């Protein structure tokens, strides 16, 4: 009996050491090939893209150091080229603290307005961008052309949209879900920019029409891999409806001094049709818009 226990204990130690020395067995990042060049990676909350080429690969949103180490292992084990370019889709730290794991001095690319967030209160885990662009930036891996578009403030001041030209895909990190038009996952919306949001969606829809793009990928790990681009026009309608409701509430005197709306006095039939609806989230979202209408912020 004692001998069996010792053998069982030895086996457990062996397994534990194997997991420690070979973290690939304890991975927290999953990888899904969208096509021969495009790989979707995700952890429990966020997801980003790897675009591979014969000479170099590109990572959009390195998320965190653990995820980036697993990206490196994935590329090496699949005989993919090393990472030359890292793209920050926007300035939010939950998506961009992994660049330190890439030790070959890659280009780190962000939209120019992100710079103000990297020059003030610092997150030491975020590596500063080495390349800033204003409206558009192009990366060519040989097999794929990546166009980084800036369509104005939307989810914060500097979120970009990545177009994968040969794959006819868009990567839109926030504001849309591949599951369908819905309420946002964060209803407090401190980063939403109502003044320019409609123009942002119009620009994406113009790109979709001109390039005949059928699918997009989001930055939310809970989403399905691909969404049809008609979802984007439906999401735009959602925000237009929110804006119209806020304006109506102002006109009818339903907004209090703290910019909260008495939604029980409003017609909610159309807005209740959207996924993830609840009264509390609606109040917070409308307050974001009434704050803008009253204060311009």
Image: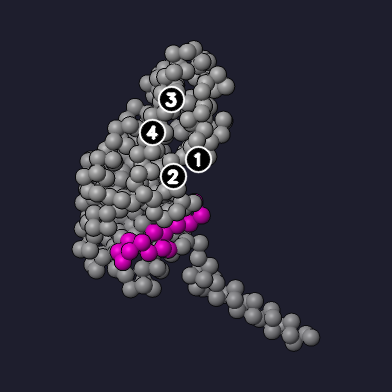
**According to the image, label 2 marks what residue?**
180
Contact flag, marks 2 and 3 (Cβ < 8 Å): no
- Between the residue at mark 2 and the residue at mark 3, the CA separation in whole angstroms equals 22 Å
* Residue 237, numbered circle: 4
> Eyeballing the image, is 56 above or below 234?
below
The boundaries of the magenta stretch are 31-45
Q: Is residue 97 visible?
A: no
Contact flag, marks 3 and 4 (Cβ < 8 Å): no
Q: Earlier in the sequence, mark 1 or mark 2?
A: 2
* Eye-nearest disc, 2 or 3: 2
Q: Tell me the crowding category of disc 1: few under 14, some 14 to 19, or many 20 or more residues within 10 angstroms, Cα based.
A: few
Q: Residue at x 45, y 32 (%)?
A: 190
Dot 4: what SS? helix
Q: Residue at x 37, y 64 (%)?
A: 33
- Between the residue at mark 3 and the residue at mark 1, the CA separation in whole angstroms equals 20 Å
Contact flag, marks 4 and 1 (Cβ < 8 Å): no
Foreground residue among 48 and 176 = 176
* Residue 275, numbered circle: 1
Question: Which quarter of the picture shows residue 288?
Answer: top left
Q: Earlier in the sequence, mark 2 or mark 4?
A: 2
Q: Residue at x 48, y 31 (%)?
A: 271
Dot 3: what SS? helix
* Eye-nearest disc, 3 or 4: 4
Image quadrant containing the C terminus? top left
> Eyeballing the image, is 226 above or below 289?
below
Q: Earlier in the sequence, mark 2 or mark 3?
A: 2
């Amino acid at each position: 009996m004692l001998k069996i226990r010792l053998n069982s204990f030895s086996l457990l130690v062996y397994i534990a050491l194997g997991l420690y020395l070979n973290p690939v067995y304890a991975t927290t990042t999953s990888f899904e090939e969208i096509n021969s060049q495009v790989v979707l990676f995700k952890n429990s909350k966020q997801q980003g893209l790897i675009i591979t080429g014969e000479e170099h690969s590109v990572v959009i949103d390195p998320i965190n150091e653990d995820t980036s180490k697993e990206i490196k292992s994935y590329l090496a084990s699949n005989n993919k080229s090393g990472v030359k370019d890292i793209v920050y889709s926007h300035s939010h730290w939950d998506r961009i603290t992994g660049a330190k794991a890439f030790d070959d001095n890659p280009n780190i690319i962000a939209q120019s307005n992100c710079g103000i967030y990297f020059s003030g209160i610092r997150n030491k885990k975020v590596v500063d961008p080495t390349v800033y662009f204003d409206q558009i930036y192009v990366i060519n891996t040989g097999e794929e052309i990546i166009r980084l578009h800036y369509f104005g403030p939307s989810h914060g001041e500097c979120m970009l949209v990545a177009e994968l030209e040969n794959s006819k895909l868009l990567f839109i990190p926030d504001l849309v879900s591949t599951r369908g038009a819905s309420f946002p996952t964060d209803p407090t919306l401190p980063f939403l920019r109502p003044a320019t949001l409609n123009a942002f969606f119009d620009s994406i829809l113009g790109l979709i029409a001109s390039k005949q793009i059928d699918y997009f990928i989001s930055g939310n790990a809970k989403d399905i891999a691909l969404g049809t681009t008609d979802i984007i026009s439906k999401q735009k309608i959602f925000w237009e409806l929110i804006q119209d409701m806020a304006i109506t509430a102002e006109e009818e005197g339903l907004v209090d001094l703290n910019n909260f709306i008495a939604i029980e006095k409003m017609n909610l039939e159309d807005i209740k049709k959207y996924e993830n609806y609840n009264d509390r989230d609606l109040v917070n979202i409308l307050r974001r818009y009434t704050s803008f209408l009253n204060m311009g912020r």
